[in-house]
Amino acid sequence: MNKRYGVRLSANQRRQVEQLVKVAKVAGYNLPHANMLLMADADGPAMTDPQISKALGVSVAQMENLRRRLVEEGLHACLSRRPQERPSIEPIFDGEKEDRLIAMACGKPPEAYGQWSLRLLADRALELKIVASTSHEAVRRVL
């Protein structure tokens, strides 16, 4: 079967991928991808997708997708996670709401308080209807 996307790593790319495999502390998804690329390299072992699938316990489709990604997006894209196109949870604070929260935190705290606390900021943001709901953790991430 003719492959639509072939893997041919340059000497520099091969060295980079081999170094990644040798390093003990790498992200869990990097190691299988690096091994798959090394095994599929036309200048290396040039194993077929079914052979790689059997050796590493991955699906043939996963190998085909990795080949395509290498050709279309490059080596860095194969060895890193793809960022989400849209987050699964919309942020509570957008730019304007963040600005209002930061301005409030930089301002004078309410009487009887020496300084703003995260919980106090969250409560005040709710009182001023900056956001419909929030928590002190969301405020911490913004600040």
Image: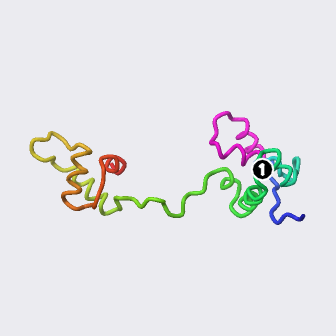
Instruction: From this view, report whether residue 12 is shown above or below residue 88.
Output: above
Callout 1 secondary element: helix
* Image coloring type: rainbow
Q: Front-most of 1 and 54?
A: 54
> What residue span does the magenta drawing correspond to?
14-35
Residue for point 28% across, 61% down? 132
Report the label total: 1
Q: Which residue is mark 1?
A: 37
Q: Where is residue 35, by image quadrant?
A: top right
* In the image: residue 46, left or right of residue 72: right
* In the image: residue 89, left or right of residue 29: left
Instruction: From this view, report whether residue 91 is shown above or below residue 47.
Output: below
Instruction: From this view, report whether residue 24 is shown above or below residue 64.
Output: above
Q: Front-most of 55 and 4?
A: 55
Residue for point 27% across, 53% down? 102
* In the image: residue 130, left or right of residue 40: left
Instruction: From this view, report whether residue 86 is shown above or below residue 10.
Output: below
Q: Where is residue 98, by image quadrant?
A: bottom left
Q: Is residue 53 magenta?
A: no
Q: Residue furthest left?
A: 111
Residue 107, position as x, y percentages in the image = 18, 50
Residue for point 85% across, 53% down? 50
Q: Is residue 24 magenta?
A: yes
* In the image: residue 32, left or right of residue 107: right
Q: Front-most of 125 and 116?
A: 125
In terms of secondary structure, what is the magenta stretch mainly? Answer: helix
Q: Front-most of 90 and 16?
A: 90
Q: Amino acid at mark 1?
A: Leu
